[in-house]
Image: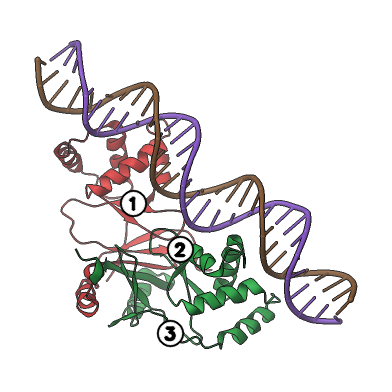
Chain colours: A red, B green, C purple, D brown
Amino acid sequence: MKPRASGCCHAHDAELPDLTEKLRRNSRKITGPRQAILAAMRNHPRPLLIKEIHGLLGKRDCDLVTVYRSIDLLRRMGMVRRIEFGKGGSRYELIPEGDSEHHHHLVCEACGRVLQIDECLLLDAERIIEKASGFRAVTHRLEFFGLCPDCQG
Amino acid sequence: MKPRASGCCHAHDAELPDLTEKLRRNSRKITGPRQAILAAMRNHPRPLLIKEIHGLLGKRDCDLVTVYRSIDLLRRMGMVRRIEFGKGGSRYELIPEGDSEHHHHLVCEACGRVLQIDECLLLDAERIIEKASGFRAVTHRLEFFGLCPDCQG
DNA sequence: GCCTCAGATGCAAATGATTTGCAAAACCAG
DNA sequence: CTGGTTTTGCAAATCATTTGCATCTGAGGC
């Protein structure tokens, strides 16, 4: 279980055809705002606030409300995932193509820096809980919080 | 790891002296609203919305704003814990006295029913993450979601 | 290339949770 | 029981998110 800095990385364009295909399949349109939002998220691979995404676009490219609506569409299409860090609103991150495994985050409570934790040890726990509780389709939400090296005072 | 229904249980009054003492120590006052809120939470031992707590009191006992302020005070005094289930606002639950261990919840995504999961397997994970990341004071937030038996359809 | 029309967008305004300002009311130490 | 600090209630401000609606636009069909 090694945390990994989720800094900027690859920006391969393979997601654009993917978007095109998925949108077409649902008779949705490939619009400027949607491409711009996806591009912004690709260039900033960490959980972003709606407000941050909007800021990355420059207010003229698209309205804040459109960011909300587009992100929601992308989420329903399975291209974006919502994450709750508990203050200031929901955050969203791109789901890399072919990514079936989710991951967790380690968030600095002072500065908000985010590391990514790749392994997930809780898939077994979900099955155990299903058996013990009678619940079905059990998923989980797990985030870690602490003070990053720069904020330890 | 056995989920446990977090239904109503004991309502021993040992918390009232505790509250009194803690409040006095910080030169805060023991007021009607604060006692009423604590009593309401003791009688409904599950994560409650501010709105629900307010509802339990009868609007005349105390203003919604006072519930917000009192809950925040109780939280800062370590008597109440905040939980985020991700929709409809934060929830709060009483921390039983002498309780050092936290627990997690299993939430039905359809009806909102909540079971409590007592064991926590992640304390080791926190230490491991501290070592690997350089973060300190690492804590975590973990909730499970699924469909309870009544909502599987 | 042009038309048409469902789907998308912008803007204003509604909603819902939470916070803040301030004057009046409630504790409690002396 | 009195003074002075803490709390409360009420109104209004904030903040994130959603909704209504008139207008605009991408994409398939001509």
Q: The disc labelled 2 sits on which kind of residue?
A: Ser
Judged from the image, the secondary structure of the residue bearing numbered disc 1 is strand
Residue A89 at what x, y percent from top left?
43, 53
**Nearest-to-viewer mark from 3 and 1:** 3
Q: Residues within 10 Å of mark 3 (few under 14, many from 20)?
A: few
Q: The disc labelled 3 sits on which kind of residue?
A: Cys
Query: Do marks 3 and 1 share a subunit?
Result: no
Residue position marked by numbered label 1 in the rendering: A92
Q: Is residue B48 above or below residue A52?
A: below
Q: Is residue D13 shown left or right of residue B27?
A: left
Q: Residues within 10 Å of mark 2 (few under 14, many from 20)?
A: some
Q: Nearer the viewer, residue A83 or B83?
A: B83
Residue A101 at what x, y percent from top left?
20, 62
Q: CA distance from mark 3 to mark 1?
A: 39 Å
Q: CA distance from mark 1 to mark 2?
A: 19 Å
Residue D29 at what x, y percent from top left?
10, 21
Residue position marked by numbered label 3 in the rendering: B9
Instruction: Give the quadrant of residue A51.
Output: top left
Q: Is residue A1 shown left or right of residue B52?
A: left
The answer to whether the residue labelled 2 contacts the one labelled 3, judged by CB atoms less than 8 Å apart, is no
Residue position marked by numbered label 2 in the rendering: B90
